[in-house]
Image (tube, rainbow, N blue to C red):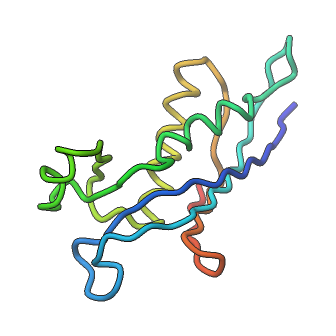
Amino acid sequence: MKVGIYKEVQIDTSHRLLHYEGKCANLHGHRWKVEVWMEGEPDQKTQILIDYSLIKKVINKYDHQIILNSEDPMVPRISEFHPVITTPGDPTSELIAVLIRDDLYAVCKDYGIKATVPKIRVWESPTSCAELRE
């Protein structure tokens, strides 16, 4: 039996876009909303595909963090005072969706969970989101 589940998590992070001309080139923060859809075969004993709290834990890795492009010259200086999550490119909502998807697949592998992530939405404002579909 294949089932699908949905989880929504809100996080607060700051970022800037190194290769962007405009306001988002400045360090700024967002209240991000992350929506995750997962599908697969639930565990035979528990009938749970994946614990919702595990999805939340994966996403909360980014909560109250500074996320910067690994090439950003601000990384070494800010790292003196606060941890920085670095990304392989500008930390756009599109890239954050990919990173969260990859984190979820890694956790599923670690826990032996047979699930896929057919869709993720990462909202950086109430009117703007990126959607990743498999």
Horizontal side of 97 relative to 76 (left or right) equals: right
Q: Total of numbered circles in the picture?
A: 0
Going 58% across and 75% down the picture, which residue do you hit?
A: 125
Horizontal side of 88 relative to 30 (left or right) equals: left
- For this rendering, which residue is in front, 24 or 46? 24
| Residue furthest front as drawn | 81
Task: Give x and y (percent) for residue 113.
Answer: 65, 23
Going 31% across and 70% down the picture, which residue do you hit?
A: 27
Task: Give x and y (percent) for residue 71.
Answer: 15, 58
Horizontal side of 120 relative to 24 (left or right) equals: right
Q: Quadrant of the N terminus?
A: top right
Task: Give x and y (percent) for residue 36.
Answer: 67, 51
Task: Give x and y (percent) for residue 72.
Answer: 17, 61
| Residue furthest bottom as drawn | 22
Q: Quadrant of residue 4?
A: top right
- For this rendering, which residue is in front, 33 or 133? 33
Q: Quadrant of residue 18?
A: bottom left
Reply above or below: 119 against 61.
below
Reply above or below: 18 against 33.
below
- For this rendering, which residue is in front, 123 or 94? 123
Q: Quadrant of the C terminus?
A: bottom right
Going 64% across and 81% down the picture, which residue do you hit?
A: 127
